[in-house]
Amino acid sequence: MNSPRRRRDVAGVPSWLERVFGDPEERLLSLADVEGLAARAAAFARGGGETSLGATSSWAGELRWALNRATLASDRRNHELRVARTIDGARGGVVTNQIDDVSIEGAVRAAERTLHYDRTNPERIPDKPPRFDYPKTAIWSDATSGQPADERARGVQAIIAPAEQAGMVSFGFVAVQATGHAIIDPALGDSLYARYTDAQCSLTVRDAKGMGSGWAGASSYDWSRIDPHALAQRALQKCLASRNPVTIEPGRYTVILEPQAVHGLLRYVFAAAAPLTNRGAEHNPRNPFNLRDGMSKLGLQVTDSRLTIVHDPTDPDLGMVPFLDDGQPLRPITYVDHGLLANLSYMRDYALRWLHENLGFPGRLTYRMSGGSSTIDEMISTTPRGLLVTRLSNIDVLDERSTLLTGVTRDGLWLIEHGKISKAVKNLRFTESALAVLNSIEMLGSPEPVFSPREPAIVPPVKARDFSFTATIDAI
Amino acid sequence: MSLTRRDFLQAGTTALLAATPSWLVASPPGRKPNDGGVPRLNDPDTQELAHLAVQAARSAGAEYADVRLTHVYDRALTHRGSISDAEEMGVGVRALFNGYWGFASGPTWTPQEVRRLGHEAVSVAKVNAIGERRIVDLAPVPANETGHWESPQRIDPFTVPVDEILDFLGGVAVYIQENNPGVDPLAVSTHFTRREQAFASTEGAYLTQALTTTAGGLAIQLEKYPPGEDHQASSDLLLTAARGWEYLRDNDSALRAEGARLQAQLEADWRLPWKPVDVGRYELIVDAAGMARLVDGTLGAATELDRALGYEANASGTSYLDDPVAMLGTLQVASPLVTLTANRSAPAALGTVRWDDEGVRPDDFTLVKDGILADYQTTREAAGWLKAAYMKRGTLVRSHGCASGQTALFGPMLFPPNLRLEPGARSVGLDDLIADLDRGVYVRGLSVSLDFQQRDGWSVDPSLFYEVKGGKTVARLVHAGLLFRTTELWKALTVLGGPKSLRSIPAMRTKGEPAQAAIYNVGAVPARFKQQTIIDNWRKA
């Protein structure tokens, strides 16, 4: 290794600095780059043991607009290196975003210092070696990673245009992202590497006096699956149709929840089925899937029997990185099978302690919820009195045990009378249990992708009875 | 997408090692092995990088450009020996072209990379600058300002040996175990951050700052407790502050005493019976921390000028101050008792800086004066939106210095400065407010949620509601909640605590697309409100 010579060139720049980064157009660290970094890290290690490296590098191209004009276009990159040292079962790790030698050596030293104090888990249960049967997942799109900034700019102008022509005001955000994700761990044997892309587009169209608001959004790993023009039209139509809302009394209503509204509720059911704590449903009396101490509701009916909710990484609409940070392959999981609670997810330590098998924790809330054949029009025409809900916002959990939530409707709420949309109404605050909604279903529509960046979900529209609205709110 | 062992072997480990590129060798300016890694801000190389970045943007055609370099260190430890260390460096260039902003950022502090970022920022701004020019009227700053500032600290926590910190934390745990039987110290913890940053602009600024924060935490659990009762509590004594290691070291005995205090607080609660809430209108008392969260969620959010003008409509929401220019100086938003000020100068507060993230020296200013909306939080661009209003009332058009970015990897935007609900004149504390209340409700640790325009709000966990009778808390109210209309609530304020009851708590705002966060402090005093709606929060319609 050469020691840097601090010679200054004519421009007054220390020339050794020029060599730090390779090709600036190379936005992501390749597998070879990361393996090179891992080898450097291993070379710096002292005291034996093993050195592992996780590396994530990303690029994002973004464009934000407000009041019908672009407000910020950006191009952002970053790295994240997770350097870990393991000696005799003790483990220490640190995180840095620097990939030069000095930083990596510093990170290795810091990891070793952390390891020295590792008394947290003296009896760390070893994993069984993972099976390397990684599923094939659809997560990369050249159209996304290669999207030039001017294409984004033109696209956004086309999104703004219909709103501006209608005298409305458009606000929104378009982003594409590409990420390289690697795990180099001697305990796994193989190097794991995956590249993935993310794309999103969402917008809010408001009328100039703030008397109406419409929203539309879509996200996918593949930009070409997003139809910005359709989104622009949808948000504009929602805005126009939502203007000058009238006040209605809160109370119980039959609701037609568009997929985005259903997704707002489902997140909390998922948080119970795959809790981000080392306490599974069996041992957490506050978990809605807890039956009694030491026992979950597995095998019992928890929703309407028409519902099946699966997490399947091989689903072309639900692609994810096929391996987890501990090298476990991502597995398909059926959480709800025709209304019965079929499986739960557990974090590693809990799974090994109580189930003696770590099946891997998906980490992200991606799912496909089964639907039915009804259209939203059919749901409306069969409703004597009810509400059509675009989406839910500002949601808080009131009672975890019963998935009791509160929040507000947003960006389009309409009263249905005698099978027809009769008028736009002011937003309402709701107080309702997500699981109760899944047990009060009258009709189901065709599942479709919702706006859920980096956590894809396929969700049907739902018609449900007795949805509880507890207050009117003035926000539009 | 993943590689198999066979692929790996075919590529050959030797070949991979031999092919280690030369860019792995050099390091950013000022870094030496094991020095804690923080490049010294006075390293001429750092200033050179900043200079190169703005030069590159200017030569690419920027009307204005600035660059931020940030280096953040983060360390968290618990008494059980878990240590987490993280560092992140970033450099971000922002450029203005024909009224359109471009931003480019990355993790690499090298001349080649900062030049690329300078060009890229202009390039992405240019592609949006089609059609008519967007008017960006940046409020002026003094030209060619240079300087360095550090948040006051006596002991840099990153220089304190890990052993000393673990001894300190372990000492607190052992003290509580030995002196407070039945109290189990679940975690004694600390968390430090150090953020070094440099700023330069095409207006000749070069400003460097180092901001340190320190927090101390204690979570306890009582071994014996009545069934169904809460038996865990966390200390709020040493919440995150812009202080050094001395913040913990000087408060050693106070932190040790928290074990007994938390135990007493839990046990005092158990002695009060649970009572179903009788839904209705009540006199309401809110403690200082609850008032701080109320200020933050309502007036604090509503007076962000970008939000009031709709810039956050597709993200965190808009504001009930929806005609901000017309409302300025005329709209009554609260009782005449209410004055809300803002600053980035309060000692030890998280929003305190010498310069904001666009090189502005923030001033202390008043957002609400005697209940009337007096001003908004602004950046240089946002101050320009108020030009007419400011000129009409004869005040200078200047930014209040509210520009901030989570790190240099994010473009700066408008974030709240430190906020302060000014105390009442009389020397009144929380205990006096409760003692003076014949019949009503006291809420401890009020936490609120609001709609996307802050018009309507409701309490959420962990707010604790108590029935007050004859000046005493007599019962806990089961699942009670507060439901309010923001403006009505603030107009119903009847008593404010005095200066001694002021409490300042850390706050964090997340906004923008992509979402980013900033931290600041909100100071407030306890208060009494008339006729507030108390509901059963769990009751459906």
Image (cartoon, coloured by chain):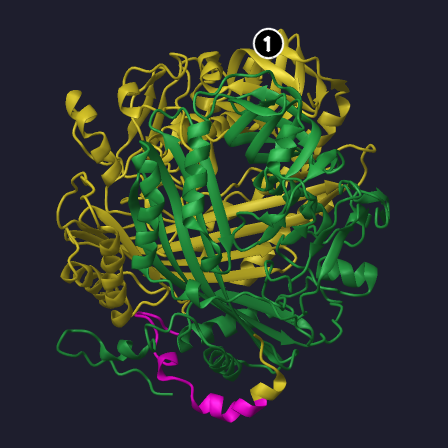
Chain colours: A green, B yellow
Tell me: A29 left or right of A305.
Answer: left
Amino acid type of disc 1? Leu
Rendered residue at 70%/37% (across/down): A443
Q: Secondary structure at mark 1?
A: loop
**Image quadrant where residue B448 sits:** top right
Q: Is residue B502 visible?
A: no
For label 1, the residue is B437
Residue A343 in which image quadrant: bottom right
Horizontal and vertical percent position of residue B36: 42, 66
Q: Is A371 or B363 nearer to us in this picture?
A: A371
* Residue B339 visible in rendering: yes
Dot 1: few (<14), some (14–19), or many (≥20) neighbours within 10 Å? many
The quadrant in which the C terminus of chain A is found is top left
Residue B485, given in percent of the width and then of the height, sits at 50, 18
- What residue is drawn where x is 23% and y is 67%? B115
Magenta includes B51?
A: no
Classify A7 as above or below A99: below
Give the number of callouts: 1
Is residue A346 positioned above or below B320 on the image? below
The chain letter for the residue carrying disc 1 is B
The range drawn in magenta is B9-34
Q: Quadrant of the N terminus of chain A?
A: bottom left
x%, y% of residue A52? 58, 75
Q: Nearer the viewer, residue A322 or B197?
A: A322
**Depth check, front residue: B311 or A208:** A208
Horizontal and vertical percent for residue B120? Answer: 26, 62
* Magenta residue check for B32: yes
Q: Left or right? Give the position of B377 relative to A120.
A: left
Left or right, B12 with respect to A61, comes to right
